[in-house]
Image (cartoon, rainbow, N blue to C red):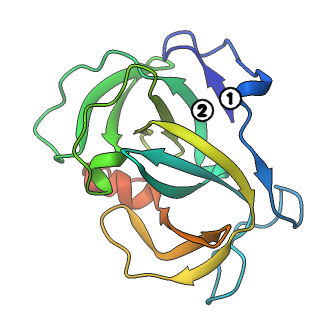
Amino acid sequence: MRTAGTGEAAGHVHQTSSEQPERTGHGPAAGAPARAASGPDEALPGLHLAVEAGGRRALLAARQVLEMVRLVALAPAAAGHPASLGTFRWRGQPVEALDLAALLGVGREPALDAQIAVLATTPPVGLVLDRVRGLHERPVAAPAAGGPGLAPVFGEVGGERLPLLNPRALAALLGQEGA
């Protein structure tokens, strides 16, 4: 995963110690086979970002993030999902941005220091979030009801159950079925 200043200047990588998320947990290297947890109390494979937007937190598999970019000016999108904030150009292609806070039921305007996680879907989808709160290795799975853009499982991190984001389902909310 790379971080960049803007969608247009994606070649500049920023890695300062104050921006590095906390890494916790135990388990195999990030290159472990990608498979979903098959039941409760089983670990979700790989590294997961604990992300926050509008005071709500969720988990996102790190392998599903192509790049983190700073919030950029967004052009209005065609009539679409209510959580859509608009589109921006990333590496020469248009990307529609969804507001994570809106998906989690919080109405708010993203702050100027918000970030966009460019997700590994086809075509890519941007997920606007306030901050990355930590990096967790193999969080424990717990069953959940799911919902729009969410997997039917929670990830348990430090005793807190966080909804697991599903990039394919997020792309489907925008009518991008080829995720």
User: Eyeballing the image, is 121 above or below 91?
Assistant: below
Quick check: 119 left or right of 35? left
* Residue 177 in view (yes/no): no
Quick check: 97 left or right of 133? left
User: Eyeballing the image, is 83 above or below 161?
Assistant: above
Q: Which residue is mark 1?
A: 2
Quick check: 61 left or right of 46? left
Q: Nearer the viewer, residue 121 or 58?
A: 58
Give the x, y percent position of residue 63: 66, 50
Q: Nearer the viewer, residue 20 or 8?
A: 20
Q: Tag 1, which secondary structure?
A: strand
Q: Nearer the viewer, residue 71 or 172?
A: 71
- Which quarter of the figure has residue 114? top left
Give the x, y percent position of residue 15: 75, 22
Q: Which residue is mark 2?
A: 67
- Which quarter of the figure has residue 96? top left
Give the x, y percent position of residue 147: 32, 70
Kindly identify the amino acid type of the residue bearing the numbered disc 2. Answer: Glu
Query: Is disc 1 in contact with disc 2, using a CB cutoff of under 8 Å?
Result: yes
Which residue is depicted at the point 35% across and 22% down?
Answer: 88
CA gap between label 1 and label 2 equals 5 Å
Kindly identify the amino acid type of the residue bearing the numbered disc 1. Answer: Arg
